[in-house]
Amino acid sequence: MLHLNIQGLKDRSAWEAAGIALPRYDVEAMKARTLQRPSWVHFGAGNIFRGFLAAAQQTLLNAGVTDTGILAAESFDFQIIDKVYEPYDELSLLVRMHADGFYDKEVVASVAGGYKADCAGPDWARLVQVFQNPSLQLASFTITEKGYALTDLAGETLPVARQDFAAGPDAPRHTMSIAAALLYRRFQAGGHPIAMVSMDNCAQNGKKLREGVFAAAEAWERAGLVPAAFLAWLSDQKKVTFPWSMIDKITPHPSEQVKKALEDLGLQDMTISRTNTGTLIAPFVNAETTEYLVLEDAFPNGRPPLERAGVYFTDRATVEKAEKMKVGTCLNPLHTALAVYGCLLGYTTIAAEMADPDLRALVEHIAAEGLPVVEDPGLLSPRKFIDEVLRQRFPNPAIPDTPQRIAADTSQKLPVRYGGTLQRYTQRTDLAVSALEYIPLVFAGWCRYLLGVDDALREMPVSPDPMAPALQALLAGVKVGTPETCTDQLRPILSNAAIFGVDLYQAGLGEKTEAAFRAMLAGPGAVRTTLRRYLSERA
């Protein structure tokens, strides 16, 4: 029997017999050094962190080019710490899934501690101490797009943010306020330099993080809760930076198939749990083998030599091009299209969708519509990137990724994944945004998805989305099977530039989206019929 904890790792021969690689360093000594002189703290303790960033740091530890690990902090879903950090001594089992069915397995031990970023909890004092330590070089974030949002659909400040702005740095709850509060403690302790690094799939993610931190700090300064000197320190790029990044690695929910394979090898306690916020979590992370991280090299207090682990360091302009290429054209928009239509058409894996000729053609056309406005970042070729996504990554049957997972928070993803393309089309004199056909078909499919009924007219769960209740209320009265029930319900949705990046009616796409949506209301099979008609008529 193999137990994923520090004591269990001491039986190295048993792990090696099971084909599982172990860390090549003294884990307990690494943890002690990290707690004494931390260099990296990460917010967002979920799968992308455990399956990519922690593994990258382990590469450096194994090579002996660094001797400290990462401290993980969770500011939203505290049960992640309870369920998969503390019981396993912060160890993770990373399963890299090859398309031929082979699993690479590695125990990742580079996480030196898992903290709940709760200002009222026992870990808060430890986090404050970490931020006060001059050795800290960076704080990174994978908190998803919605983790940066401080306003609602109407542009009003969220209640939690209003409370934070009034309470000051002693009682932060929103992750942006938490980051600002911890930076304030660093400022008070001498103001040592630090890089605050967003690694989320957001356009200009470093800018979003900076704006969130400054929103809290400026509110506190106006209320006299922090001095103006704190704002001056935050604004000094020799002291605090907010580098931009592009990250890419598909890390789906933990797979029952992988769980069984690990148990067959003798692994104990490989339980897949659902937290009270709906997150599926396990002591293992299953992920694809492909991974990219492009970072703006702006670290005023130094940084880990992550280029030794395959990370690209470059300037901001190149990062932005790489991010726009991936998030706005070459991967994420295609994922969202497959998510929406996969749910409507009854699919449960992305790989299975890629065997559907209609869906494969749809994402190929969406990619083709985005390519004319993509700038080549130089580091990565957009055309080669798309080919890798469509020929190798999405069709990989070993990756148990689901359209239902990817459909979560779609309202937050659309402006990131499609808005930039639409805006760049409007800025080009040689291209007509109104000529787009397949991108508006995604928007129509998403609105049809929000009705909660699939193409066979079966009730279908709608994945969690902070805007779903308000959007579904706007669609009240629209009935599948009776297209005439759709009158003007779509207008407040399609005209909302906060959702799509542009007002679709002003862009000449509103009526086109409405027409496709109404066609999908005709009855059973109308989604498939509409999709095929678009593909055939525009072939």
Image: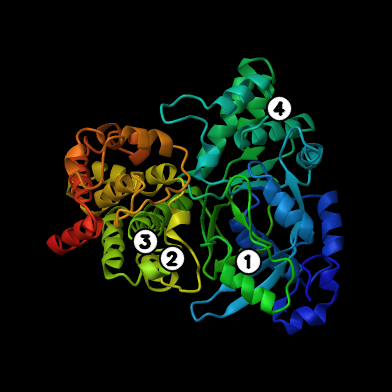
Query: Is residue 141 rendered to the left or right of residue 480?
Result: right
Residue flagged by tag 3: what amino acid is it? Gly
Which amino acid lies under the numbered mark 1 shown in the image of this protein? Ala
User: Where residue 104 sits in the image (x, y, percent)?
Assistant: 62, 76
CA separation in Å, label 4 and label 1: 37 Å
Image quadrant for the C terminus? bottom left
Mark 2 vs mark 4: give the one in front: 2
Residue type of the residue flagged with mark 2? Thr
Tell which of 321 and 326 is nearer to you. Answer: 326
Disc 4 to disc 3, C-alpha distance: 45 Å
Please name the residue that numbered disc 2 is placed on.
349
User: Callout 4: helix, strand or loop?
Assistant: loop
Query: Which numbered tag is attached to residue 346?
Result: 3
For disc 3, the neighbor class at 10 Å (few under 14, some 14 to 19, many from 20) is: some
Q: Around disc 2, counting alpha carbons within 10 Å, would you say few (fewer than 14), some (14 to 19), or many (20 or more)? A: many
Residue 395 position, x and y percent, is: 41, 72
Q: How is the image coloured?
A: rainbow
Q: Residue 28: x and y, percent?
A: 86, 62
According to the picture, the residue beneath numbered tag 4 turns out to be: 171
